[in-house]
Image: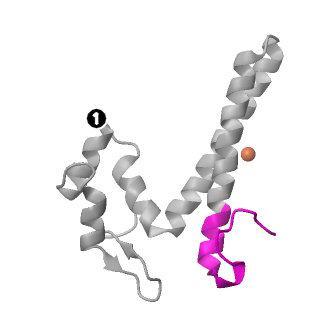
């Protein structure tokens, strides 16, 4: 299966990167579909058709969440950020400060400064403070 969204020669990408790409592209498509169905439902004057469009919108939300869960299970960076920000309460922008002890906006630089280089990958990940995947 090909994808038009690759930004590097396919043969230079790892299987992991290709799988993550497939998931991310799928999530983008599902989110677009959610938006399209909601707008069509709003614009629809037939009540029965509006109900179907709204139902279909929720199905696309389900699909997007299934792929997001796949990302969480298969990529520790996604898992870390999801654990920090999802299903939380209060000011979302303050969660980074609570998580890192730094003010919002400084966290990315801080994570890069304290993160570990992934052997053989050439990128860094921030410190995981909760003992691993969750
Ligand atoms: Fe879908």
Ligand 1 placement by image quarter: top right
Q: Residue 107 at what x, y percent from top left?
A: 26, 57
Residue located 62% across and 55% down the image: 67
Residue located 68% across and 41% down the image: 32
Residue located 24% across and 55% down the image: 106
Classify residue 85 as left or right of residue 29: left
Q: How crowded is mark 1: few (under 14 residues within 10 Å), some or many (20 or more)?
A: few
User: Can you say whether 117 is above or below 106 in the image?
Assistant: below
| The N terminus: image quadrant | bottom right
Q: Residue 110 at what x, y percent from top left?
A: 24, 64
Q: Which of 49 and 111 is in front in this view?
A: 111
Residue of label 1: 90
Determine which quarter of the picture holds residue 118.
bottom left
Q: Is residue 52 magenta?
A: no
Q: How many labels does the image show?
A: 1
* Colouring scheme, one of rainbow, by chain, secondary structure, one colour: one colour
Q: Which of 86 and 103 is in front in this view?
A: 103
Q: Residue 23 at what x, y percent from top left?
A: 64, 61
User: Can you say whether 20 is above or below 63 in the image?
Assistant: below
Q: Does residue 129 appear in this view? A: no
Determine which quarter of the picture holds residue 6.
bottom right
Residue located 28% across and 66% down the image: 111
User: Can you say whether 62 is above or below 42 in the image?
Assistant: below
Q: Does the magenta stretch include residue 10?
A: yes
Q: Which of 118 and 48 is in front in this view?
A: 118
Classify residue 93 as left or right of residue 118: left
Which residue, as the protein is rendered here, is positioned at the far left? Answer: 101
Q: Does residue 66 appear in this view? A: yes
| The C terminus: image quadrant | bottom left
Q: What stretch is highlighted in magenta?
A: 1-22
């Amino acid at each position: 299966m090909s994808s038009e969204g690759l930004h590097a020669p396919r043969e230079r990408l790892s299987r992991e990167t290709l799988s993550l790409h497939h998931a991310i592209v799928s999530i983008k498509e599902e989110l677009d579909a959610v938006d399209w169905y909601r707008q069509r439902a709003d614009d629809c004057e037939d009540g029965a058709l509006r109900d179907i469009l709204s139902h279909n919108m929720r199905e696309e939300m389900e699909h997007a969440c299934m792929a997001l869960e796949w990302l969480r299970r298969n990529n520790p960076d996604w898992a870390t950020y999801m654990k920090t920000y999802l299903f939380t309460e209060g000011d979302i922008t303050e969660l980074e400060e609570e998580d890192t002890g730094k003010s919002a906006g400084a966290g990315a630089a801080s994570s890069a400064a304290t993160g570990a280089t992934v052997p053989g990958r050439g990128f860094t990940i921030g410190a995981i403070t909760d003992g691993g995947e969750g």
